[in-house]
Amino acid sequence: MLKGPYLQDLAPTSITVMWHLDRAAPARIVVEGPGGERAIDVAAARIGEVTVDRLVPSSRYRYRVEAGGQRWTGEFATAPEIGVDVPFSFIVMGDTRNGFDAHRRVVERMAQEVPDFVLGTGDMVDDGYRQDQWQQFFDVESQVLRDNVYYPAVGNHDRQGRGRTADSYRAFFSVPDNGGDTERYYAFSYAAARFLVLDSNEYSFALTDQTAWLERELIAARQDPAVRHVFVVMHHPPFSISLHGGTRDLRERWTPLFENYQVSAVFSGHDHVYERAEHNGLRYFVSGGGGAPLYPRRPRPNPVDLEAVKKFERAYHFLRVTVTGNRVEVTAIRTDGTVIETTAWTEGTPPPAPPPPPAPHDPAIAATGANAAAMTPAEPPADHPPEPGAGSLVWIGLGCVGLMLAAAVTVVRTLRR
Ligand SMILES: [Fe+2]
């Protein structure tokens, strides 16, 4: 067994189990939980994949993979029914690449959490063509992926070759096949939340089909009363003050859609740091501290990025996201278990306004300073015409009388003719 077994594509009544053997062999999957034990035989293959269906929602199962006279065991919990408003949590982490030791420290700390699933923000490996690097990723993540479903986003380093294909990524992961470009972008539901995992690589987001798909998904989510939260995951961040900085094309193409359809939060990687940004009422997190060498803060960030980013830390970390009813809580956790920060909000509530300027001490200044605005009637905004006052009504009345007199004179003159 080179990789796995590991879990993919979590649903209320099904889950996908995968594994990678050093040579092709038939396998048997045994699942044990509510309703007893069930075995599925799988034909000989090196990369094995089986979808176990007819499971009971919100239930815990044990499973084992038997191949070549050996067996490997794991466990999982099925998702709740779609639309059911139950609390749940997930982990966000990314940019592990070639940072073997740091990656292992992040994973060791993650193993102390009990998430419902894990979201990857991309750049799992340094070079998508290198099979030894994929092996290293799966070696370090082995225990996490055996007992937790992992949803990957494809990063720029996960691709391979001149055509920037994603053949290894596609071979090793089995995500919902509901996007336009097989498995490179996709959507899934968990409880009352919808997750959109996008391919933000230049080659792909330039394609209009992904943007059209994204908007269709956002419209559908917002028309569905069972969806309370929409979360977006993609490798490149729209806003960042670290080495790469924010991505202008994403800000122009996708950020307006996120705003229009009130996405709950956007999770990215690419810059190997933790960042929290707020822009036009939406929250953006960069979680790229999964193991690759950490990046510095940019000496001269783009003003757009600088305005948006509210928190920056250069640290190996992961995010724990907890969803309870309308409340979302995001905690960034370092490898030593200490907390960078916790951000919580209730859906439908915009991010808090920046703190007001400090009140001046001199009462005379206060009367003419910022506080004076409260004492002065506000000017009506330019696009709202002023309401008609008493003076206006007098003039309207006089106008009416004038019109009636003019009409009477006309009638009298006509009669005289
Ligand atoms: Fe990247």
Image: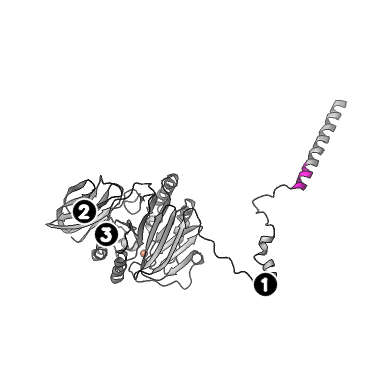
Q: Is residue 119 left or right of residue 219?
A: left
Mark before the other along the chain sequence, 1 or 2: 2
Colour style of the rendered protein structure: one colour
Of labels 3 and 1, the one closer to you: 1
Q: Are marks 3 and 1 in contact (CB under 8 Å)?
A: no
Question: Could you say whether the residue bearing mark 1 is in a helix, strand or loop?
Answer: loop
Q: Is residue 144 left or right of residue 213?
A: left
Q: Which sits in the foreground, 66 or 201? A: 66
Q: Which residues are magenta?
A: 386-396
Residue 145 badge: 3
Image quadrant for the N terminus?
Answer: bottom left
> Which residue carries the number 1 mark?
362
Q: Position of residue 290 (x, y in %)?
A: 34, 66
> Which residue carries the number 2 mark?
63
Mark before the other along the chain sequence, 3 or 1: 3
Task: Provide the major secondary structure of the magenta segment.
Answer: helix
